[in-house]
Image (spheres, helix red, strand yellow):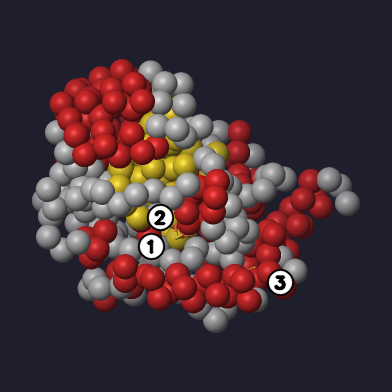
Amino acid sequence: MTSLHSCSQSGVPQYHTVILKTVGSACNMRCAYCYEHDLRAEASPFLQPNDFKEFLNQISHSSEVNFLFHGGEPLLYPKPWMKEMLHMIKEALPGKHMIQFQTNGTLIDEEWLEIFKEVEAYVAVSISLDPLSDISLRHLPGEDYRKIVLKRIADVLRELGTVGVVSVAHQANLSAYTLFIEELISIGVPYLTINKIRRNHQAKVQANRYLLSETDYVSFIKETMTDWLNRRLYEKIQIQPFISLLSTDVNQICQYLPLEGKCQSFITLYPDKQISNCNHLHQDRQNIYQKNRNKLTEDCIYCSIYEWCGGGCLAEEKEDDFCQARGHLHQFIKGVFNEGSGT
Ligand code: SF4
Ligand code: SF4
Protein backbone atom coordinates (compact mmCIF):
# COMPACT_ATOMS: atom_id res chain seq x y z
CA MET A 1 0.00 0.00 0.00
CA THR A 2 1.26 3.49 -0.84
CA SER A 3 2.20 5.45 2.27
CA LEU A 4 0.48 8.68 3.19
CA HIS A 5 2.50 11.82 3.78
CA SER A 6 1.89 13.89 6.88
CA CYS A 7 -0.39 16.77 5.99
CA SER A 8 0.91 19.05 8.70
CA GLN A 9 4.37 18.85 7.10
CA SER A 10 3.12 19.87 3.67
CA GLY A 11 1.27 22.94 4.91
CA VAL A 12 -2.21 21.75 3.90
CA PRO A 13 -5.24 21.63 6.19
CA GLN A 14 -5.27 18.95 8.90
CA TYR A 15 -8.86 18.18 8.08
CA HIS A 16 -9.04 15.27 5.63
CA THR A 17 -11.69 14.14 3.27
CA VAL A 18 -11.11 10.48 2.46
CA ILE A 19 -12.77 9.48 -0.80
CA LEU A 20 -13.50 5.76 -0.66
CA LYS A 21 -13.84 4.22 -4.10
CA THR A 22 -14.92 0.88 -2.69
CA VAL A 23 -16.25 -0.31 -6.05
CA GLY A 24 -13.82 1.61 -8.25
CA SER A 25 -15.66 3.04 -11.23
CA ALA A 26 -18.33 0.28 -11.36
CA CYS A 27 -21.82 1.73 -11.82
CA ASN A 28 -25.31 0.56 -12.80
CA MET A 29 -25.96 3.83 -14.66
CA ARG A 30 -24.45 5.04 -17.93
CA CYS A 31 -24.38 8.82 -17.68
CA ALA A 32 -22.94 10.44 -20.78
CA TYR A 33 -20.91 13.05 -18.88
CA CYS A 34 -19.38 10.61 -16.39
CA TYR A 35 -15.58 10.72 -16.43
CA GLU A 36 -15.33 7.77 -14.01
CA HIS A 37 -16.04 5.20 -16.72
CA ASP A 38 -13.05 6.56 -18.59
CA LEU A 39 -10.59 6.29 -15.75
CA ARG A 40 -10.57 2.53 -15.48
CA ALA A 41 -11.99 0.71 -18.44
CA GLU A 42 -12.05 -2.66 -16.69
CA ALA A 43 -14.29 -3.12 -13.68
CA SER A 44 -11.82 -3.70 -10.85
CA PRO A 45 -12.54 -5.98 -7.89
CA PHE A 46 -14.07 -4.29 -4.88
CA LEU A 47 -12.01 -2.99 -1.96
CA GLN A 48 -11.47 -5.76 0.60
CA PRO A 49 -12.42 -4.88 4.19
CA ASN A 50 -9.01 -6.08 5.42
CA ASP A 51 -7.26 -3.70 3.06
CA PHE A 52 -9.41 -0.89 4.36
CA LYS A 53 -8.40 -1.78 7.90
CA GLU A 54 -4.73 -1.45 6.92
CA PHE A 55 -5.48 2.00 5.47
CA LEU A 56 -7.38 3.06 8.60
CA ASN A 57 -4.35 2.23 10.74
CA GLN A 58 -2.39 4.81 8.75
CA ILE A 59 -4.85 7.62 9.43
CA SER A 60 -5.99 6.73 12.96
CA HIS A 61 -3.90 9.66 14.35
CA SER A 62 -6.06 12.19 12.43
CA SER A 63 -7.95 14.82 14.38
CA GLU A 64 -11.07 14.60 12.20
CA VAL A 65 -11.94 12.72 9.02
CA ASN A 66 -14.83 13.00 6.59
CA PHE A 67 -15.30 9.64 4.83
CA LEU A 68 -16.98 10.04 1.47
CA PHE A 69 -18.24 6.82 -0.14
CA HIS A 70 -17.99 7.54 -3.83
CA GLY A 71 -18.04 5.59 -7.06
CA GLY A 72 -18.87 4.55 -9.57
CA GLU A 73 -21.92 3.70 -7.51
CA PRO A 74 -20.97 2.99 -3.87
CA LEU A 75 -24.20 1.07 -3.12
CA LEU A 76 -23.03 -1.73 -5.42
CA TYR A 77 -20.71 -2.66 -2.55
CA PRO A 78 -21.86 -5.75 -0.59
CA LYS A 79 -23.94 -4.64 2.41
CA PRO A 80 -22.17 -6.92 4.95
CA TRP A 81 -18.81 -5.43 3.89
CA MET A 82 -20.18 -1.91 4.19
CA LYS A 83 -21.42 -2.67 7.72
CA GLU A 84 -17.96 -4.03 8.56
CA MET A 85 -16.25 -0.91 7.22
CA LEU A 86 -18.55 1.44 9.12
CA HIS A 87 -17.86 -0.53 12.29
CA MET A 88 -14.09 -0.29 11.71
CA ILE A 89 -14.33 3.49 11.26
CA LYS A 90 -16.28 3.81 14.49
CA GLU A 91 -13.67 1.75 16.35
CA ALA A 92 -10.65 3.53 14.85
CA LEU A 93 -11.86 7.14 15.04
CA PRO A 94 -14.51 7.34 17.76
CA GLY A 95 -16.17 10.78 17.73
CA LYS A 96 -13.73 12.02 15.06
CA HIS A 97 -15.45 11.16 11.82
CA MET A 98 -18.36 11.97 9.55
CA ILE A 99 -19.84 9.68 6.90
CA GLN A 100 -21.10 10.79 3.52
CA PHE A 101 -22.58 8.72 0.70
CA GLN A 102 -22.55 10.17 -2.81
CA THR A 103 -24.93 7.89 -4.68
CA ASN A 104 -27.02 7.85 -7.83
CA GLY A 105 -29.85 6.78 -5.51
CA THR A 106 -31.33 4.06 -7.68
CA LEU A 107 -30.21 1.17 -5.43
CA ILE A 108 -31.42 2.56 -2.12
CA ASP A 109 -33.71 0.03 -0.45
CA GLU A 110 -34.97 -0.69 3.08
CA GLU A 111 -31.71 -2.44 4.04
CA TRP A 112 -29.58 0.50 2.90
CA LEU A 113 -31.84 2.87 4.81
CA GLU A 114 -31.27 0.75 7.92
CA ILE A 115 -27.50 0.88 7.37
CA PHE A 116 -27.60 4.69 7.03
CA LYS A 117 -29.69 4.94 10.19
CA GLU A 118 -27.32 2.75 12.19
CA VAL A 119 -24.39 5.12 11.63
CA GLU A 120 -23.89 6.87 14.96
CA ALA A 121 -21.78 9.70 13.54
CA TYR A 122 -23.13 12.54 11.43
CA VAL A 123 -24.27 10.91 8.20
CA ALA A 124 -25.15 12.69 4.96
CA VAL A 125 -26.69 11.10 1.90
CA SER A 126 -26.32 13.01 -1.37
CA ILE A 127 -28.25 11.79 -4.37
CA SER A 128 -27.52 12.75 -7.96
CA LEU A 129 -30.42 14.24 -9.89
CA ASP A 130 -30.53 16.72 -12.77
CA PRO A 131 -33.29 19.11 -13.87
CA LEU A 132 -35.90 17.76 -16.23
CA SER A 133 -34.74 18.84 -19.69
CA ASP A 134 -35.24 17.73 -23.29
CA ILE A 135 -31.71 16.34 -23.39
CA SER A 136 -30.71 14.34 -20.33
CA LEU A 137 -27.14 13.16 -19.89
CA ARG A 138 -28.08 10.78 -17.05
CA HIS A 139 -29.13 7.28 -18.15
CA LEU A 140 -30.29 4.15 -16.36
CA PRO A 141 -30.67 1.60 -19.16
CA GLY A 142 -34.30 0.57 -19.66
CA GLU A 143 -35.67 2.63 -16.77
CA ASP A 144 -37.10 6.05 -15.99
CA TYR A 145 -34.23 7.03 -13.68
CA ARG A 146 -35.84 10.29 -12.58
CA LYS A 147 -39.03 8.63 -11.33
CA ILE A 148 -36.99 6.07 -9.36
CA VAL A 149 -34.64 8.65 -7.87
CA LEU A 150 -37.43 11.01 -6.80
CA LYS A 151 -39.00 8.10 -4.90
CA ARG A 152 -35.66 7.28 -3.22
CA ILE A 153 -35.15 10.92 -2.25
CA ALA A 154 -38.55 10.83 -0.50
CA ASP A 155 -37.53 7.57 1.27
CA VAL A 156 -34.27 9.07 2.59
CA LEU A 157 -36.04 12.25 3.68
CA ARG A 158 -38.63 10.20 5.56
CA GLU A 159 -36.07 7.96 7.30
CA LEU A 160 -33.16 10.34 7.94
CA GLY A 161 -35.05 13.65 8.02
CA THR A 162 -32.70 15.23 5.47
CA VAL A 163 -31.09 14.63 2.10
CA GLY A 164 -28.87 16.49 -0.36
CA VAL A 165 -29.22 16.59 -4.13
CA VAL A 166 -26.19 16.97 -6.38
CA SER A 167 -26.76 18.10 -9.94
CA VAL A 168 -24.58 18.81 -12.96
CA ALA A 169 -25.19 22.01 -14.93
CA HIS A 170 -24.55 21.75 -18.67
CA GLN A 171 -25.55 23.54 -21.87
CA ALA A 172 -28.77 21.57 -22.30
CA ASN A 173 -30.24 22.03 -18.82
CA LEU A 174 -29.35 25.56 -17.65
CA SER A 175 -32.78 26.97 -18.45
CA ALA A 176 -34.49 24.19 -16.47
CA TYR A 177 -32.95 25.12 -13.09
CA THR A 178 -35.68 27.54 -11.99
CA LEU A 179 -38.32 24.82 -12.22
CA PHE A 180 -35.92 22.26 -10.75
CA ILE A 181 -35.30 24.34 -7.64
CA GLU A 182 -39.06 24.75 -7.21
CA GLU A 183 -39.51 20.99 -7.69
CA LEU A 184 -36.95 20.22 -4.96
CA ILE A 185 -38.54 22.73 -2.58
CA SER A 186 -41.96 21.17 -3.18
CA ILE A 187 -40.73 17.75 -2.02
CA GLY A 188 -38.81 19.16 0.95
CA VAL A 189 -35.18 18.81 -0.22
CA PRO A 190 -33.16 21.23 1.93
CA TYR A 191 -29.75 21.09 0.17
CA LEU A 192 -28.77 21.35 -3.49
CA THR A 193 -25.26 21.38 -4.94
CA ILE A 194 -24.83 22.57 -8.51
CA ASN A 195 -21.61 21.36 -10.16
CA LYS A 196 -20.33 22.56 -13.50
CA ILE A 197 -19.97 19.76 -16.08
CA ARG A 198 -16.34 18.59 -16.39
CA ARG A 199 -14.53 17.89 -19.64
CA ASN A 200 -14.54 14.19 -20.43
CA HIS A 201 -11.10 13.38 -21.81
CA GLN A 202 -11.64 10.03 -23.45
CA ALA A 203 -15.36 9.50 -23.73
CA LYS A 204 -17.63 10.02 -26.67
CA VAL A 205 -17.80 13.52 -28.04
CA GLN A 206 -21.52 13.69 -27.15
CA ALA A 207 -21.07 14.81 -23.55
CA ASN A 208 -18.41 17.38 -24.40
CA ARG A 209 -20.90 19.08 -26.73
CA TYR A 210 -22.62 20.32 -23.58
CA LEU A 211 -19.59 21.81 -21.80
CA LEU A 212 -19.98 25.26 -20.30
CA SER A 213 -17.47 28.04 -20.67
CA GLU A 214 -16.72 29.88 -17.41
CA THR A 215 -18.56 32.87 -18.93
CA ASP A 216 -21.71 30.79 -19.44
CA TYR A 217 -21.39 29.31 -15.98
CA VAL A 218 -20.95 32.71 -14.32
CA SER A 219 -24.00 34.12 -16.19
CA PHE A 220 -25.99 31.14 -14.98
CA ILE A 221 -24.85 31.61 -11.37
CA LYS A 222 -25.66 35.32 -11.44
CA GLU A 223 -29.15 34.76 -12.85
CA THR A 224 -30.06 31.79 -10.65
CA MET A 225 -28.63 33.29 -7.47
CA THR A 226 -30.49 36.57 -8.09
CA ASP A 227 -33.79 34.70 -8.39
CA TRP A 228 -32.98 32.63 -5.26
CA LEU A 229 -32.25 35.81 -3.31
CA ASN A 230 -35.13 37.92 -4.65
CA ARG A 231 -37.73 35.25 -3.97
CA ARG A 232 -36.14 34.41 -0.58
CA LEU A 233 -35.84 30.77 -1.67
CA TYR A 234 -32.80 30.48 0.64
CA GLU A 235 -35.32 30.13 3.46
CA LYS A 236 -36.33 26.79 1.92
CA ILE A 237 -33.27 25.42 0.14
CA GLN A 238 -29.55 25.95 0.68
CA ILE A 239 -27.68 25.96 -2.61
CA GLN A 240 -23.96 25.47 -3.18
CA PRO A 241 -21.91 27.24 -4.45
CA PHE A 242 -24.21 30.22 -3.60
CA ILE A 243 -23.88 29.75 0.18
CA SER A 244 -20.08 29.63 0.04
CA LEU A 245 -19.81 32.53 -2.39
CA LEU A 246 -21.95 34.67 -0.11
CA SER A 247 -20.17 33.66 3.08
CA THR A 248 -17.79 36.12 4.68
CA ASP A 249 -15.56 33.21 5.80
CA VAL A 250 -12.79 31.84 3.59
CA ASN A 251 -14.49 29.86 0.84
CA GLN A 252 -14.36 26.15 1.67
CA ILE A 253 -15.11 24.95 -1.86
CA CYS A 254 -11.73 23.83 -3.15
CA GLN A 255 -12.18 25.45 -6.56
CA TYR A 256 -12.23 28.83 -4.77
CA LEU A 257 -9.66 28.08 -2.07
CA PRO A 258 -6.41 30.10 -2.34
CA LEU A 259 -4.11 27.31 -1.18
CA GLU A 260 -1.35 25.80 -3.28
CA GLY A 261 -1.68 22.46 -1.50
CA LYS A 262 -5.49 22.33 -1.53
CA CYS A 263 -5.69 19.10 -3.52
CA GLN A 264 -3.62 17.31 -0.86
CA SER A 265 -6.37 17.69 1.73
CA PHE A 266 -8.20 14.94 -0.14
CA ILE A 267 -7.11 11.31 -0.07
CA THR A 268 -8.62 8.75 -2.43
CA LEU A 269 -8.44 5.03 -1.71
CA TYR A 270 -8.98 2.68 -4.68
CA PRO A 271 -10.00 -0.99 -4.60
CA ASP A 272 -6.44 -2.11 -5.45
CA LYS A 273 -5.18 -0.28 -2.31
CA GLN A 274 -3.62 2.51 -4.36
CA ILE A 275 -3.86 5.94 -2.77
CA SER A 276 -3.87 9.29 -4.50
CA ASN A 277 -4.95 12.80 -3.59
CA CYS A 278 -8.15 14.19 -5.11
CA ASN A 279 -9.77 11.66 -7.43
CA HIS A 280 -9.89 14.29 -10.16
CA LEU A 281 -6.10 14.21 -10.34
CA HIS A 282 -5.91 10.87 -12.08
CA GLN A 283 -2.79 10.19 -14.18
CA ASP A 284 -4.22 11.65 -17.39
CA ARG A 285 -4.67 15.01 -15.64
CA GLN A 286 -1.14 15.35 -14.27
CA ASN A 287 -0.02 17.67 -17.06
CA ILE A 288 -3.05 19.90 -16.54
CA TYR A 289 -2.43 19.89 -12.79
CA GLN A 290 1.19 20.90 -13.22
CA LYS A 291 0.23 23.71 -15.60
CA ASN A 292 -2.38 25.00 -13.14
CA ARG A 293 0.04 24.77 -10.21
CA ASN A 294 2.55 26.84 -12.18
CA LYS A 295 -0.10 29.43 -12.98
CA LEU A 296 -1.06 29.56 -9.30
CA THR A 297 2.48 30.27 -8.18
CA GLU A 298 3.48 32.49 -11.11
CA ASP A 299 0.33 34.51 -11.99
CA CYS A 300 -2.47 34.02 -9.48
CA ILE A 301 -0.54 35.20 -6.45
CA TYR A 302 -0.16 38.61 -8.17
CA CYS A 303 -3.84 38.74 -9.11
CA SER A 304 -5.97 41.21 -7.15
CA ILE A 305 -8.75 38.64 -6.60
CA TYR A 306 -6.64 35.57 -5.80
CA GLU A 307 -7.75 35.43 -2.15
CA TRP A 308 -11.33 35.21 -3.38
CA CYS A 309 -10.89 33.23 -6.63
CA GLY A 310 -8.40 30.61 -5.48
CA GLY A 311 -7.40 29.81 -9.07
CA GLY A 312 -10.18 27.29 -9.82
CA CYS A 313 -9.93 23.51 -9.99
CA LEU A 314 -6.35 22.42 -10.56
CA ALA A 315 -7.48 19.39 -12.57
CA GLU A 316 -9.44 21.36 -15.14
CA GLU A 317 -8.16 23.05 -18.29
CA LYS A 318 -8.87 26.77 -18.12
CA GLU A 319 -10.43 28.37 -21.17
CA ASP A 320 -9.20 31.81 -22.27
CA ASP A 321 -12.23 33.48 -20.70
CA PHE A 322 -11.69 31.97 -17.24
CA CYS A 323 -10.06 34.90 -15.44
CA GLN A 324 -12.33 37.50 -17.00
CA ALA A 325 -15.42 35.50 -16.01
CA ARG A 326 -14.13 35.06 -12.45
CA GLY A 327 -13.56 38.83 -12.34
CA HIS A 328 -17.22 39.41 -13.34
CA LEU A 329 -18.42 36.99 -10.69
CA HIS A 330 -16.32 38.72 -8.06
CA GLN A 331 -17.85 42.09 -8.99
CA PHE A 332 -21.33 40.60 -8.85
CA ILE A 333 -20.79 39.10 -5.39
CA LYS A 334 -19.38 42.40 -4.15
CA GLY A 335 -22.53 44.08 -5.47
CA VAL A 336 -24.73 41.63 -3.57
CA PHE A 337 -22.80 42.39 -0.36
CA ASN A 338 -23.12 46.14 -0.92
CA GLU A 339 -26.87 45.88 -1.53
CA GLY A 340 -27.22 43.74 1.59
CA SER A 341 -25.40 46.32 3.71
CA GLY A 342 -27.41 49.17 2.17
CA THR A 343 -24.38 50.93 0.63
S1 SF4 B 1 -8.80 35.32 -11.81
FE1 SF4 B 1 -7.30 34.08 -12.92
S2 SF4 B 1 -5.29 34.90 -12.34
FE2 SF4 B 1 -6.79 35.64 -10.85
S3 SF4 B 1 -6.69 34.15 -9.17
FE3 SF4 B 1 -8.35 33.52 -10.56
S4 SF4 B 1 -7.41 32.05 -11.97
FE4 SF4 B 1 -5.73 33.19 -10.96
S1 SF4 C 1 -8.32 18.70 -8.26
FE1 SF4 C 1 -9.94 20.26 -8.31
S2 SF4 C 1 -11.69 19.26 -7.28
FE2 SF4 C 1 -9.82 18.14 -6.69
S3 SF4 C 1 -9.11 19.08 -4.79
FE3 SF4 C 1 -8.00 20.04 -6.48
S4 SF4 C 1 -9.20 21.88 -6.92
FE4 SF4 C 1 -10.54 20.50 -5.76
Q: Residue at x 38, y 60 (%)?
A: 280
Give coordinates of residue 318: x percent, y percent.
Answer: 50, 75
Contact, CB < 8 Å: mark 2 with mark 1? yes
User: Going by the image, does 18 lie left or right of 33?
Assistant: right
Front residue of this view, candidates 32 and 264: 264
The residues bearing labels 3 and 2 have C-alpha atoms spaced at a distance of 25 Å
Nearest to N terminus: mark 3 or mark 1: 1
Helix, strand or loop status at disc 2? loop
Instruction: Determine whether the beta carbon of the residue marked 1 sits less than 8 angstroms from the nearest atom of ligand 2.
Output: yes
Give coordinates of residue 153: x percent, y percent.
Answer: 33, 33
The residue singled out by tag 3 in the image is 303
The residue singled out by tag 1 in the image is 281
Instruction: Determine whether the beta carbon of the residue marked 3 sits less than 8 angstroms from the nearest atom of ligand 1.
Output: yes
Instruction: Determine whether the beta carbon of the residue marked 2 sits less than 8 angstroms from the nearest atom of ligand 2.
Output: yes
Give the foreground label among 3 and 2: 2
User: Going by the image, does 88 lie left or right of 229?
Assistant: left
Q: Which quadrant of the view contains residue 70?
A: top left
Categorize mark 3 by other alpha carbons within 10 Å: few (<14), some (14-19), many (20+). few
Contact, CB < 8 Å: mark 3 with mark 2? no
Q: Residue at x 67, y 48 (%)?
A: 250
Q: Residue at x 12, y 60 (%)?
A: 42
Helix, strand or loop status at disc 1? helix
Give coordinates of residue 248: x percent, y percent.
Answer: 72, 45
